[in-house]
Image: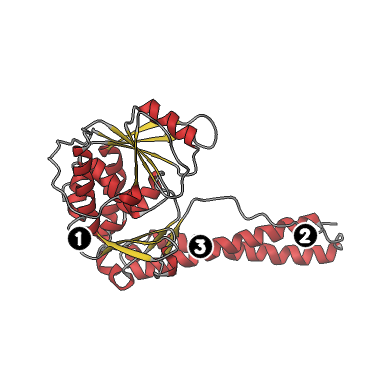
């Protein structure tokens, strides 16, 4: 199907049936269908138009993950309004500075952020977004129109705005969609998939796993926002990679005798060799077209590969610990 802009993508997924977002705010769980999100997005787009926002205007999103974030996001895109997402853990001073840099006239806030006072900028609470339909005027959108401005600093440094166009986002979505189509026939026994999204929606990967990827899965697999794990069977958690958990280093044992050191070293070498060969075998299997065409078998092999890689880490740690006790 044609994907000229993200608006085409919106029209496709908003007509899907089934649940899209599951959200638990600690008081009760809520489920929103694709149609619900489509209606709310159109209603929010209409509200933006009535408030005088036009194509090219900027709206800052400063909020924790919540369904209204996604509905407002699509509402902005429908009208060509540029989204400027900011991590909800940012300070009000930082939000005010970014708002002035981009020239935004509206800030959308969540329930978990401190009050924001900017006399010349309107502030709307996402919690107040109405889940009703609207008829916003059509706006001409092209692939090279700006969809978002993401402020990022990498690991350190002063955040800088990165301009993201419709073309940029589609360049990530379309290849994934193309690959998913190859395995639709094999995937049905394991659907619906549910992603527990622990990444902030201010991050591109967080957006991808919350609103871009779920609709391309057969049957309209829902994307869970954080907090919904208690009410839904979660298939996979989406989170940021981090350092290995810190552990208390065990006290070094006494030096081993040459004979004991040799025996233990040979055992660890044999284990490393076995695991290395098994890893190579599994990696070759993953690359086999016959295996890749069988979704269930591919999932089993990739799961075993992850177990083997974890066992290799344990064996390597044992090797290092042994070397500390070498005679």
Percent x, y of residue 39 = 20, 54
- Measured Cα–Cα span from mark 1 to mark 2: 55 Å
Classify residue 294 as left or right of residue 237.
left
Image point (61%, 54%), residue name: 244
Image point (82%, 58%), residue name: 252
**Residue at numbered disc 2:** 250
Q: Residue 319, located in which quarter of the rendered image?
A: bottom right
Q: Which mark is residue 53?
A: none
The residue closer to the viewer here, 139 or 209, is 139
The residue closer to the viewer here, 31 or 262, is 31
**Residue depth check, mark 2 versus mark 3: number of the one nearer the observer:** 2
82 shown above or below 69? above
Label 2 with label 3: CB-CB less than 8 Å: no
Percent x, y of residue 64 = 43, 49
Classify residue 7 as left or right of residue 62.
left
Q: Which mark is residue 16?
A: 1
202 shown above or below 27? above
**Residue depth check, mark 1 versus mark 2: number of the one nearer the observer:** 1
Of callouts 2 and 3, which one flags the residue occurring earlier in the amino acid sequence?
Answer: 2
Of callouts 1 and 2, which one flags the residue occurring earlier in the amino acid sequence?
Answer: 1
Q: Secondary structure at mark 1?
A: loop
Q: Residues within 10 Å of mark 2 (few under 14, many from 20)?
A: few
Q: Secondary structure at mark 3?
A: helix
**Residue at numbered disc 3:** 306
């Amino acid at each position: 199907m044609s994907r000229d802009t993200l608006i085409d993508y919106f029209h496709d997924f908003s007509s899907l049936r089934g649940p899209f977002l599951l959200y638990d705010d600690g008081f009760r769980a809520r489920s929103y269908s694709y149609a619900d999100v489509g209606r709310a997005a159109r209603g929010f787009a209409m509200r933006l138009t009535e408030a005088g926002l036009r194509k090219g205007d900027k709206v800052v999103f400063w909020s924790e993950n919540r369904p209204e974030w996604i509905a407002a996001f699509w509402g902005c895109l429908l009208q060509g309004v540029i989204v400027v997402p900011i991590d909800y853990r940012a300070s009000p001073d930082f939000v005010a500075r970014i708002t002035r840099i981009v020239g935004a006239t509206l800030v959308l806030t969540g329930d978990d952020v401190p009050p924001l006072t900017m006399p010349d900028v309107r502030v709307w609470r996402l919690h107040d977004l109405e889940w009703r339909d609207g008829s916003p005027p059509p706006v001409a959108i092209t692939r090279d129109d700006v969809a978002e401005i993401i402020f990022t600093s990498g690991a350190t440094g002063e955040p800088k705005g990165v301009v993201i166009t419709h073309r940029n986002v589609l360049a990530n979505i379309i290849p994934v969609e193309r690959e998913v189509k190859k395995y639709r026939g094999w995937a049905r026994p394991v659907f619906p998939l549910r992603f527990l999204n622990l990444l902030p929606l201010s991050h591109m990967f967080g957006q991808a796993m919350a609103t871009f990827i779920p609709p391309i899965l057969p049957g309209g697999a829902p994307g869970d926002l954080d907090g919904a794990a208690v009410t839904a069977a979660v298939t996979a958690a989406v989170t940021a990679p981090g350092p290995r958990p810190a552990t208390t280093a065990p006290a070094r044992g006494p030096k081993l005798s040459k004979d004991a050191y040799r025996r233990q070293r040979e055992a660890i070498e044999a284990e490393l060799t076995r695991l290395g060969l098994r890893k190579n075998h599994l990696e070759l299997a993953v690359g086999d077209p016959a295996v890749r065409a069988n979704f269930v078998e591919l999932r089993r092999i990739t799961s075993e590969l992850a177990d083997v890689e974890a066992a290799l880490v344990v064996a390597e740690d044992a090797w290092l610990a042994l070397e500390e006790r070498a005679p």
